Amino acid sequence: MALAASCVPETFAPTLFGGLVLSLEASVVDLSTVANSASTQPSASSEDVSFCNVTVTYTHPGQNDSIIVETWLPVDNWNERFLAVGGGGWNAGRTAGTSAAMAAAIADGYATVTTDAGLGSYSDPSPWVNPSPGNVNMQYLQNFATSSLNDEAIIGKSLVRSFYGSDPAYSYWSGCSTGGRQGLTIAQRYPDIYDGIVSGAPVIYWTRMGMANTWPQQFMNMHGYYPYGCELEAIAAAAVEVCDGLDGVVDGLISDPDACLDSFNPQELVGTTISNCSQTGGEITISESAAKVASAFWDGPRTVKGDRVWYGPSIGAGLTLLAATNCSTGVCVATENLGWPLFRYFVAKDASWVSNNLSHEAWADMGHSAFQQWQSIMDFDDPDISRLQRAGGKLLTYHGLADPMIPAKGTEHYYELVAREFPDVHDFYRHFPVPGLGHCSGGAGGPPLGLLTQIRAWVEEGTAPDHAKMNFTHPDGTTQTRILCPYPQKAFYNGRCGNAAKLDCWSCVNRNAPARTSSSTSRNQWSF
């Protein structure tokens, strides 16, 4: 506890080129217990954990911003490592979720850091994005997109140096969703500030993903199809039932969505009875409109001419998050989903804009405008990560194959573009698709176990991860462990082994080229 006495503002004097520190607070915090299962590291369970919480508020002079960087420094048993944790949604960090991840990091001995990018913890961008109708706050957007990430690394490491008298031996990044996007941003823009990066479900293609998110509601509005949620839930469950065994094991997981496309057709369920629909309180049959909405959802957004804009979520991913309807009045209508802020705040640039009654052509035109205006700022799809390679950095990405929000195909698409640039891509970047995992968490599958430990071994010992592991809930109610394979490999069950619950019965094998994918195409071969 000797370091606790140094947890005072006078110990620290961070500086930042282009930045001005406005305030610095430092205080010792005692956590009586820490028990957290972080998605990228082993469960951390500890008692009586103490750390020095250093909170720095700074600004970029002339830009009218105020950004907070919060750094937690263990007062005992620092492992000489530095771990930054990412945000989620419209939050760059400094939320309840990041606090939980930081608590686990502290229990594991890491000095850890997060930033709010000056945006607070709002669930949507409305409080800051449009300072006046027709205008976007470009400085705040730049802070969210890029610059705050470099700033927090510089400030956080400076605080580590002041507190411990030395720099971290190694530095790491971990995040999912927006945190995953931030990790890819760092790999492309600031490749020398972290030795290893773990990025889950990264929002790499921000503009295209926004269009993909709006597509289910747009499709419903264009055609007047507004199915009950129970219909869509039944269709998604049927997809899992039909495609579950394609990998040779019935375990409640779709391991190969591409193969599932050839085995499952929602139209074949039309007329199937649902015995107890939660929205009606009684029996209904699956409608043709529900089947068409499901097909459009998994297929992904298209232009008026039928050209593909982007991928849809993998078949089997839940439908009701983005294809939500409200049937409380007895007449179902679409409810606005989380994709529309792209159109409202960044294209219309008007908080009062509504998404109803957009024609297909108008929707596609707005999406094209979003791409033209924001792709260079918010899409982090540059496959040239040679600077990361030269710096000796390592990158791990993972993505749930049941993610209903960010298409898992997008991350595979990016990996393939990088692989085209670097035949030796496996030497510094590996991607793990995760069967059954929803958006960062949830779903029948679980998040990867121990990726942070694995990237540390890769960075510090040169031991590359030839596979990862996840826990999942089997349909029989038991918890089982399954291997995850680095793309383009997939897990293969040796049926002669006789027990799919045994890890030794699984191995990683090369997958056949998918029958329907555009991942190998150039970015310029999409509709825009």
Image: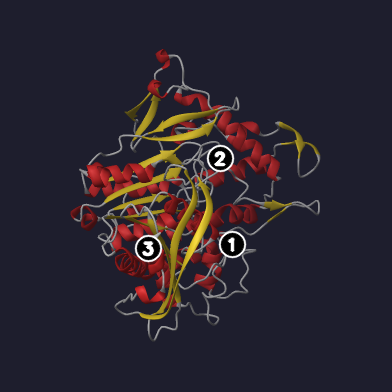
Q: Earlier in the sequence, mark 3 or mark 2?
A: 3
In space, the residues marked 3 and 2 are separated at their CA atoms by: 43 Å
Are the residues flagged by discs 3 and 1 in contact, CB closer than 8 Å? no
Q: 419 or 291, which lies in front?
A: 419
Task: Give amino acid for label 1.
Answer: Ser
* Total numbered badges shown on the rendered structure: 3
Q: Which mark is residue 359?
A: 1
Task: Give amino acid for label 2.
Answer: Gly
Q: Which residue is mark 3?
A: 3
Q: Which residue is mark 2?
A: 443
Q: Is residue 388 above or below residue 141?
A: above
Residue 205, by quadrant, is: bottom left
Left or right, 168 with reference to 496? left
In space, the residues marked 1 and 2 are separated at their CA atoms by: 34 Å
Q: Quadrant of the N terminus?
A: bottom left
Q: Earlier in the sequence, mark 1 or mark 2?
A: 1
